[in-house]
């Protein structure tokens, strides 16, 4: 029998690991392209030319793409590092909003990356735009662009999936909160602001949501990110 989503922390952790792994691969592919570009045109074109609109018909909007990669790398690293805390005290609406924004950003950058294809640039990395006798560095740059674009579309699927799953998780939390009575946690030293994902100091007993109490009763794993055992994830 398949467990409900709120009893599958490893599923959501694997999604974060997949997102982080994919964006790291894309980052390396982009670095390889920049190195190849510098080695190929260092004497005739500055590096700023690579990020300018002049190369839009060959590479897509690289500046936008690199900004999206940076934002994704920062957000996925944060969410993975804080996964256990957010799992036990969430889900938060910010999980949905951030993933949805990243989904749209990757869709936009994904279409700008395939714009050269729509303009007639071929994918075999040996065409008129690059010249008939394509050299090694140019082929490396072209292959890096191709695989980076493919992995970029994987990111679209990954963020679409995580957005849907976190939305369903949020609906589950609302159901628990609306159909159960809140309980008091007299031993807690900190209250969790469930709306803003912030820890607020308190000297009085604080209330936690029925959903959070249910999560704690399930004992699904460590509550601190530092106690994560990667072997248990897989």
Image: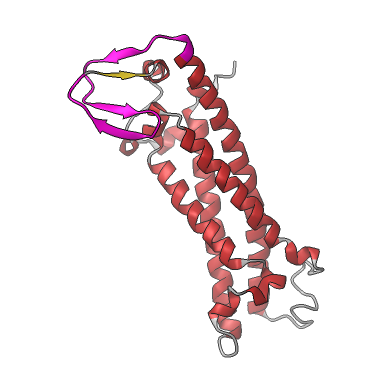
> Is 199 part of what is drawn in magenta?
yes
Left or right: 94 in relation to 168: left
Expressed as whole percent of the image width and height from the top left, the position of residue 27 reads: 53, 61
Q: Quadrant of the N terminus?
A: top right
Left or right: 143 in relation to 215: right
What sort of colour scheme is used for the picture? secondary structure
Left or right: 208 in relation to 98: left
Magenta stretch, residue numbers: 178-204
Residue 234 visible in the picture: no
In the orientation shown, which residue stands out farthest toward the left? Answer: 203
- Residue at figure coordinates x 59%, y 76% from the top left: 50
Q: How many marks?
A: 0
Expressed as whole percent of the image width and height from the top left, the position of residue 86 reads: 40, 33
> Is 220 part of what is drawn in magenta?
no
Residue 114 visible in the picture: yes
**Viewer-side residue, 188 vs 12:** 188
Where 88 falls versus 59 (above or below)?
Answer: above
Expressed as whole percent of the image width and height from the top left, the position of residue 87 reads: 42, 30
- Residue at figure coordinates x 59%, y 79% from the top left: 49
Expressed as whole percent of the image width and height from the top left, the position of residue 191 reads: 28, 26
- Residue at figure coordinates x 55%, y 19% from the top left: 3
In the orientation shown, which residue stands out farthest toward the bottom? Answer: 43
Where 6 falls versus 140 (above or below)?
Answer: above
Where 146 falls versus 231 (above or below)?
Answer: below
**Viewer-side residue, 80 vs 54:** 54
- Residue at figure coordinates x 43%, y 48% from the top left: 77
């Amino acid at each position: 029998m398949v467990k409900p989503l709120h009893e599958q922390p490893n599923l959501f952790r694997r999604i974060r690991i997949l997102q982080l792994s994919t964006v790291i691969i894309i980052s390396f592919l982009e670095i390889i392209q920049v190195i190849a570009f510098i080695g190929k045109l260092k004497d005739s074109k500055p590096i700023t030319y690579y990020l300018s609109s002049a190369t839009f018909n060959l590479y897509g909007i690289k500046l936008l793409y690199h900004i999206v990669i940076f934002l994704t790398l920062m957000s996925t690293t944060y969410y993975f590092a804080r996964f256990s805390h957010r799992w036990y005290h969430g889900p938060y609406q910010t999980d949905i909003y951030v993933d949805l924004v990243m989904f749209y950003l990757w869709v936009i950058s994904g279409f700008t990356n395939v714009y050269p294809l729509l303009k007639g640039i071929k994918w075999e990395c040996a065409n008129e735009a690059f010249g008939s006798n394509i050299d090694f560095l140019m082929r490396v740059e072209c292959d890096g662009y191709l695989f980076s674009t493919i992995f970029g579309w994987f990111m679209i699927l990954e963020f679409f999936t995580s957005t849907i799953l976190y939305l369903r998780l949020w609906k589950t939390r609302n159901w628990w909160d609306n159909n159960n009575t809140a309980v008091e946690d007299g031993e807690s030293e900190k209250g969790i602001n469930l709306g803003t994902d912030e820890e607020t100091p308190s000297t009085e007993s604080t209330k936690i949501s029925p959903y959070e109490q249910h999560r704690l009763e399930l004992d699904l794993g460590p509550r601190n990110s530092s106690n994560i055992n990667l072997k248990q994830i897989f």
